Every structure is written in structure tokens, then in C-alpha cells.
Amino acid sequence: KAGVTQTPRYLIKTRGQQVTLSCSPISGHRSVSWYQQTPGQGLQFLFEYFSETQRNKGNFPGRFSGRQFSNSRSEMNVSTLELGDSALYLCASSLGHDTGELFFGEGSRLTVL
Amino acid sequence: GENVEQHPSTLSVQEGDSAVIKCTYSDSASNYFPWYKQELGKGPQLIIDIRSNVGEKKDQRIAVTLNKTAKHFSLHITETQPEDSAVYFCAASGERGRRALTFGSGTRLQVQP
């Protein structure tokens, strides 16, 4: 059974640009959550999508957004990139909104120059 | 919101010794406490979790204890092996659900052969 797949794995952007990251959950999983990991702030919850609806949102500015498609695949978008957005963005999938463990992907490492 | 503190930040033990990592949380409404292991270049992987109605849970060499009154929980690894070397994160979730985890800052465990 394939794990959580995130693309791209690495990317470099400049300030002011925008970026879209993609996440394919484990087959059969309907919930996708996104986390940001930085050395300074650690792992921080961004948002969770279940059945194409955002169910939870962390304390991030509106520049961070996401969506989920009918096949449970999810994308997150960061607009007007800032240097502080450099981080490892982790996607995690689970069977349901509040059931089953979280399975994390290997992440997309974003560098903002 | 929830705040999770984790100690120590680094831990070095000899192979075969035990390792203990401690976390405290602030939100008395938190009811789910997972522990994750993150190896270099990989996403976090759930190793054990505990719910607020249980005081202790064990899985082979790994155990977790929870003291709701004191709002702290601990991870115990016995008979450590070199492959246990990794970064370990505790986490807690409350009323926002089990997908919106608040993570501790992590403990880098080094098991010396």
C-alpha cells in the first residue's frame, strides 16, 4: 500500500512569489492535514480537510490556503512568500476526521530567497 | 490555546539503557496524546498514543504514562538500540480534534553502541 505522497519534494522560490504543494493521501483515507515544520517554531498545524471541506484551521495568516478534491488529494497554497515561510511542509492523512492515526508524508521542503 | 513543553531537548544513552522523555500540557481539555518518531529526511511516524481515560499503555519496549492531574505524560523506551536514534515528539489534542495536534519541541535521542 503506497504511503502519503508529496510533491514537489524540494523547491526554491523568491519573496513575493506564490507556491502550490500537492499531497496524495493513502488510498481510502479521506482526511488530509497540513503541518509546517521549522527549526524555530517546530511542528505547527496549518489546516485539515475532510470530504472537501476545511474542518480545522491553525493560527496562520490568510496567505496560507488549501483545498481538497473529490479523490481526497489536497493542495496547499502560500501566496506572497516571505523569508519566514521557508520550512518543511508536511502532509498527513487518516481514515476519517477523528478516527485512525495520522500517517505523514516525507514533506516538501520550501526555501524562500 | 494548548501549549506543550518537552524535555530534554537532547538525550544520549548507552545501548541497552532506558530513555525517558517528559512532556507537560496546558489545556485540561486535551484528551489525546500521541508520540512520534522522526528520522532524518522522513516524516514523523506514530509510535504510541494514549487517551485521557487511560493512565498507562505499553507496546513491547515502548510505554507511555499519563498523569491528568499534573498534566504531564512521559515516553519510556527500554533496552534501547542504535535504531532508536531519532527525534521524538510528543503532542496533544483537545477540543479542535485529533487532527489539530500541538507538538512539543522534540527530543533528539542518540543511542551509543
Image (cartoon, rainbow, N blue to C red):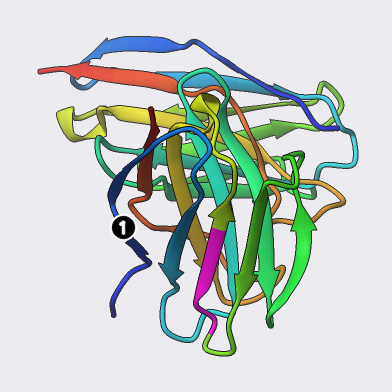
Q: Quadrant of residue A109?
A: top left
Q: Is residue A25 magenta?
A: no
- Examine the rendering and report whether any part of residue A71 can be seen: yes
- Examine the rendering and report whether any part of residue B78 can be seen: no
Q: Residue at x 46, y 41 (%)?
A: B36
Q: In the rendered view, would you say B4 is above or below B112?
A: below
Using residue B88 as the reference point, say whether residue A47 is left or right of it: right
Q: Amino acid at mark 1?
A: Pro
Q: Quadrant of residue A34?
A: bottom right
Q: Which secondary structure is most common in the magenta stretch?
A: strand
- Local SS, label 1: loop
Residue B71 horizontal/vertical position (percent) = 80, 26
Residue B7 horizontal/vertical position (percent) = 55, 13
Using residue A104 as the reference point, say whether residue B65 is left or right of it: right
Quadrant of the rendering where the C terminus of chain B is positioned? top left
Residue A63 horizontal/vertical position (percent) = 68, 46
Q: Residue at x 31, y 45 (%)?
A: A11
Using residue B103 as the reference point, say whether residue A8 is left or right of it: left
Q: Residue furthest left?
A: B113
Q: In the rendered view, would you say A26 is above or below A9?
A: below
> Magenta region: which residues?
A72-76
Q: Residue at x 45, y 31 (%)?
A: A86
Q: Residue at x 63, y 63 (%)?
A: A66
Q: In the rendered view, would you say B25 is above or below A5?
A: above
Identify the residue under disc 1: A8
Using residue A62 as the reference point, say whether residue A44 is left or right of it: left
Label 1: chain?
A
Quadrant of the rendering where the N terminus of chain B is positioned? top right
Residue B107 horizontal/vertical position (percent) = 44, 20
Q: Is residue A73 magenta?
A: yes
